[in-house]
Image: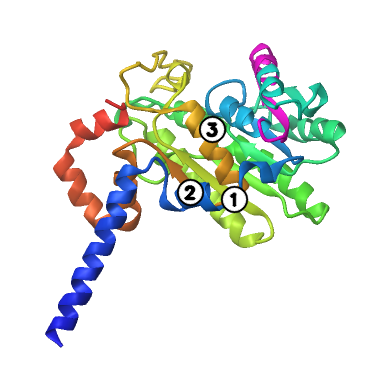
Amino acid sequence: MAFFFYFVAISFFVYHLVRLIMWALLDSDIELFFLSKLGRPISSLRGKVVWITGASSGIGRDLAIALARNGVKLCISARNISELLKVKQACIAQSNGSLGPNDVYVLEMDMLHLNHHNDYFNMVLDHFKTVDILVNNAGRSQRAEWGSINIKVDRELFELDVFAVVNLSRVALNFFTRNSMKGHLVVTSSTAGLIGAPNSGTYTGAKHALHGYFEALRNEFPNVHVTMFCPGPTATNFLQECFTDTPGAKFNQTVQPTDRRMTSERCGHLYALAIANKTHLSWVGTFPINFLLYIGCYYPNLKRVLLKIIGMERLQRVRDSR
């Protein structure tokens, strides 16, 4: 009998050790890794209409290109119309002839104009007659010490990263339910939505809030698919636009070539796979991001011990991809 219990204990330990090693070495969670090999290909979305907010640069841009390569019709929106037009040309060029100018609709849009969200949605409907998938990608990050953040920054960041996303999603949800559609709502969250990120208190709070909002939506409307996608540090221009602790101020720094970050192209490709497979939750990132997420999500008590061992200085270096 003692041998049996030792065998079970060792097997349990080995099983989780193997899982931990896999988490550490992969650049995505295990589910998304297997789906990338055995699940639905991005091409399964061919002909669908996907609306991506915040599509003028970074992850939104590369997600649009990854979808365009597979014949997905796109609405791309942001405030910067000139950059959107460049993204449109890139999407058409990468589509191998499957998309024409009318298949990529450019929509100049400010997410903070909540009173116009219905108007924006109707403009997309006028063009495509439908929306199959809404990708809420618009938003800004933050770099600031928790204790010094002006409360106005908290409100401004939540207005953009949370309330604008929730409001536009409600517009889409009403369209899906009114037309008896099994629509798909997608949200660009962050690894900060799963574990607390240092020097990004408001941003971390906003991403956690999104998970709460959309988990409740998923429970109330089981016929509507919800995907939460959580990128780790990614090589984009996001640091320039980051909120700080002061209203109106921007962090205005650039990602360094020596930073250990996932490329935006790789992130966009994995994002497209998560959408194609309608995952509930997916995260991506380079080592040691997945290791920390695995511990943080599945072993929260062990996480507290691990963070004490790592220390705030090392955790900050991980946060800054250095």
Q: Is residue 90 above or below residue 224?
A: above
Does the stretch in magenta take in 214? no
Look at the numbered discs 1 and 2 and tell me whether their residues touch, using CB distance below 8 Å. yes
**At label 1, which amino acid type do we have?**
Asn
Image quarter of residue 95: top right
Q: How many marks do you count on the picture?
A: 3
Query: Which is nearer the N-term, disc 2 or disc 3?
Result: 2
Query: Which is nearer the N-term, disc 3 or disc 1?
Result: 3
Name the residue beneath numbered marker 1: 277
Residues packed near mark 3 inside 10 Å, few (<14), some (14 to 19) or many (20 plus): many
Point 51% across, 27% down: residue? 265
CA gap between label 1 and label 2 equals 9 Å
Name the residue beneath numbered marker 3: 268
Residue 86, x across and y down, in percent: 66, 14
**At label 2, which amino acid type do we have?**
Leu
Q: Nearer the viewer, residue 88 or 241?
A: 88
Name the residue beneath numbered marker 2: 32
Residue 132, x across and y down, in percent: 74, 44
Residue 138, x across and y down, in percent: 58, 30
Q: Start and end of the magenta stretch?
A: 69-88
Query: Which is nearer the N-term, disc 1 or disc 2?
Result: 2
